[in-house]
Image (tube, rainbow, N blue to C red):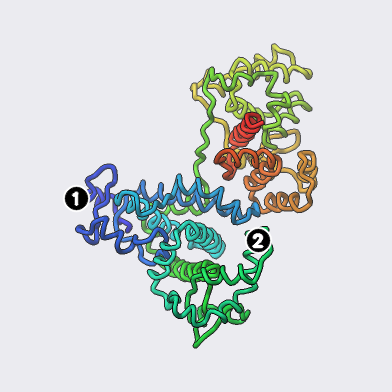
């Protein structure tokens, strides 16, 4: 899979396509059709066969980062205590964008390309995340959730085909055998089926409905050593050393198998890492990936003269209608500016670039800053002499004429924490638990469980998760309305301007609906 030197790579005939087309290194005659009949026969995989083709370094990094975006969102959803159903709805659009797995009805080349990307990206992340126990555990947890989500997306035919393709000593119970043991199967499953039915329907669960559910259920015959938990809890029917596992319990059974195989494989992968230490191209990429940082993709909708930002001016940026959409870091900076009539360099940069990102033009920015700085002892002449250049510079009108972008959370968190009289940074990192709790209360978050979740996330260093959780709690009603109407992006917030845009967009959807 990995080439040893750049020179060898460039010299290879099978790499002549600059777009990075794939020609099978192991078996040049293997066609996409054959791949679909062998290792890519199902959308879902246990990733038992390691990659065997060459890929470019660009693909290596891009595919890994795309998968990482999905796994980070899963991990972040776990940290925000999302239910499986909520997680499902937030992950599906991200999966479709970064790691789609189409059904067999699409064209073959596309199917192979998608499954290859899924396959290779999984193995690349194995390399990046096998280095420590903590990274391994995080990877296994996120991958097993992804596996479960995808299993649920399969049709029952695909699920059946997938289980058969695993070549585990399990077999589907045929109709004849099911009828022979039907009463015992029903007796063993009655309690969990009642639970499922009472959750799914509002009608009273009767013996007939339980019987009908059981009659439709597919069972798997599994050797007892694979299911010690189910055997010891007497929750399934046992016969001649086999447990009869109903369909509704099969996912956790298969997921457990996935987890144990992946955990074992990661132990093996970590032993191959020293061989990679000689490769000066892959290691930096893997180190970068394992730190979990993804270059932020946020793009502001703002363009100079954009009509949509017409309401953003020197006055409105401090009005409730606009400032209600600010994340905590920006409200904190505004508060500091009001108190001090001044902000030190990092605070000025953080707030000024944020305001530029939401659509404040340079003229309005100069009005806003001069107005606020001259509320104290400073006069306009001093402002023009000492600060005008700085703000014009941020808009690319002075010095190197670089059009600076608003800082994302990663950039903000990479700066030193604020000292006394400074207001920059991220309050989820910089405020004490007591002060943060007070801020949360002011935002209307008073439920002790919610407050504890946010404070815990912050003290663990999961600042963007804490911020996203706050967004979800403070926009609960709007999210409910918007998600009924349209697919709404609720992924992790990693940029203050993303927080602002998302909040404003929600308000707009609600306004249109009402
Ligand atoms: Fe601001 Fe990002 Fe911190 Fe939220 S997580 S407060 S957007 S820096």
Identify the image quadrant of the N terminus.
bottom left
Which residue is drawn at the image coordinates 75% and 30% (left, top)?
335
> Is 24 on the left or on the right of 266, as rendered?
left
* Alpha-carbon span between mark 2 and mark 1: 60 Å
Indicate if the residue with disc 1 has its beta carbon within 8 Å of ligand 1: no
Q: Nearer the viewer, residue 159 or 419?
A: 159
Q: Secondary structure at mark 1?
A: helix
Instruction: Residue 160: give x, y in percent of width and height.
Output: 42, 67
Ligand 1, seen in the image, is in the quarter at top right
Q: Position of residue 102 (x, y in %)?
A: 39, 51
Residue 397 visible? The answer is yes
Q: Which mark is residue 135?
A: none
Residue 13, labelled with which disc?
1
Other-residue count near label 1 (Cα within 10 Å), few / some / many at <14 / 14–19 / ≥20: few
Identify which residue is drawn at 66% across, 66% down.
205
Q: Position of residue 53 (x, y in %)?
A: 29, 57
Front residue of 182 and 18: 182
Q: Quadrant of residue 438?
A: top right
Q: Which residue is mark 2?
A: 199
Q: Is residue 454 above or below residue 248?
A: above
């Amino acid at each position: 899979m990995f080439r040893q030197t750049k020179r060898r790579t460039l010299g290879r005939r099978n790499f002549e396509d600059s777009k990075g087309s794939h020609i099978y290194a192991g078996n040049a005659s293997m066609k996409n059709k054959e791949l679909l009949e062998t290792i890519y026969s199902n959308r879902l995989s246990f990733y038992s066969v390691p990659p065997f083709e060459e890929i470019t370094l660009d693909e290596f990094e891009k595919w890994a980062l795309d998968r990482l975006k999905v796994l980070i969102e899963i991990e972040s959803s776990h940290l925000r205590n999302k239910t499986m159903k909520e997680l499902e709805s937030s992950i599906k659009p991200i999966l479709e964008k970064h790691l789609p797995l189409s059904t067999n009805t699409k064209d073959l080349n596309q199917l192979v390309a998608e499954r290859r990307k899924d396959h290779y990206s999984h193995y690349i992340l194995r390399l990046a995340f096998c280095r420590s126990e903590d990274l391994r555990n995080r990877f296994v947890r996120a991958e097993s959730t992804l596996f479960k989500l995808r299993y649920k997306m399969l049709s029952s035919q695909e699920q059946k085909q997938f289980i058969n393709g695993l070549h585990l000593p399990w077999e589907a119970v045929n109709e004849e055998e099911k009828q022979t043991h039907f009463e015992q199967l029903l007796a063993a499953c009655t309690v969990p089926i009642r639970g499922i039915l009472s959750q799914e329907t509002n009608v009273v669960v009767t013996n007939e409905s339980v019987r009908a559910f059981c009659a439709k259920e597919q069972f798997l015959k599994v050797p007892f050593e694979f299911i010690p938990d189910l055997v010891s809890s007497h929750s399934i029917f046992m016969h001649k050393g086999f447990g009869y596992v109903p369909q509704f319990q099969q996912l956790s059974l298969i997921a457990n198998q996935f987890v144990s195989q992946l955990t074992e494989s990661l132990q093996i992968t970590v032993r191959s890492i020293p061989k990679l230490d000689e490769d000066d191209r892959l290691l930096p990429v893997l180190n970068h990936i394992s730190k979990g940082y993804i270059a932020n993709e946020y793009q502001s909708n703002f363009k100079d003269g954009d009509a949509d930002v017409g309401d953003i001016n020197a006055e409105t940026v401090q009005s409730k209608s606009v400032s209600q959409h600010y994340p905590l870091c920006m409200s904190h900076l505004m508060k500091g500016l009001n108190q001090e009539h001044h902000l030190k360099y990092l605070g000025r940069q953080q707030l000024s670039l944020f305001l530029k990102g939401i659509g404040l033009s340079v003229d309005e920015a100069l009005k806003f800053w001069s107005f606020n700085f001259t509320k104290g002892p400073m006069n306009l002449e001093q402002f023009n002499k000492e600060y005008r250049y700085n703000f014009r510079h941020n808009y690319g009108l002075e010095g190197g004429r670089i059009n600076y972008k608003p800082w994302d959370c990663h950039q903000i968190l990479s700066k030193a924490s604020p000292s006394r009289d400074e207001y920059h940074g991220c309050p989820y990192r910089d405020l004490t638990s007591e002060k943060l709790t007070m801020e949360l209360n002011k935002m209307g978050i008073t439920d002790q469980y919610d407050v504890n979740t946010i404070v815990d996330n912050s003290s663990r260093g999961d600042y963007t998760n804490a911020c996203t959780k706050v967004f979800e709690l403070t926009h609960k009603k709007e999210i409910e309305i918007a998600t009924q109407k349209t697919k709404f992006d609720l992924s992790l917030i990693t940029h203050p301007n993303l927080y602002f845009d998302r909040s404003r967009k929600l308000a707009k959807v609600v306004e249109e609906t009402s």
